[in-house]
Amino acid sequence: PAVYPYWSAKRNLKYQLSLIKNPKYSVSELLKIVGLKDTRKPLIQYSLGMKQRLGLALALANQPDLLFLDEPLNGLDPSGIRQIRDLIKALSEDHGVTIVISSHILDELQKIVTHIGFLKDGILIHECKNSEITEESLEEFYFDEFEQ
């Protein structure tokens, strides 16, 4: 996210909210939603997972109905992947946000999504419900269907 690295998450959010007319959430509400606890240290000291959380807080500031995330799990350690995965699910289930995720980490996506679409050269080549995948994993489904 576009932030000031020497500011805290709280200060960055406060500034971003000042730019939004009638924000739907307060700074403290956003920090609670994304699970950021230590908001006093500057962002330059944050882990990648904490920065991802702040990015989600910034994206939620105006309570969007639709949120696009590009590789939200990329570069995270296993703990960070689980935390962001759980957060994405909670945003959808608890806050009613429809989330479109672009990612190459298929097995992690399978743990989050309800619907799947595969793009090739910018064209939707397959779309289905996650529950319709009968193979052991989404990755196996992809290779069986599209990489023959």
Image: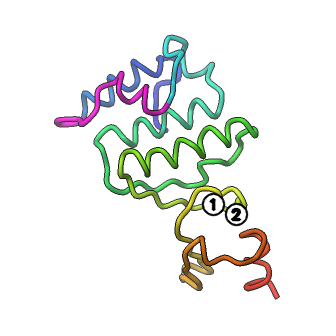
Q: Is residue 120 left or right of residue 61?
A: right
134 and 141: which is toward the camera: 134
From the image, tell me which residue sits under label 2.
106
Furthest residue toward bottom: 148
Q: Residues within 10 Å of mark 1 (few under 14, many from 20)?
A: some
Location of residue 84 with respect to 142 vertically, above or below: above
Give amino acid for label 1: Ser
**Residue placed under numbered mark 1 in the picture:** 103
Q: Residue at x 56, y 37 (%)?
A: 52
Looking at the picture, how far across and down is residue 4, in whole percent? 47, 25
Which quadrant would residue 13 be assigned to in this image?
top left
Magenta residues span: 20-34
Residue 72 pos. (x, y %): 59, 48
Looking at numbered disc 2 in the image, what kind of residue is underneath it? Answer: Leu
User: In front: 63, or 9?
Assistant: 63
Q: Secondary structure at mark 2?
A: helix
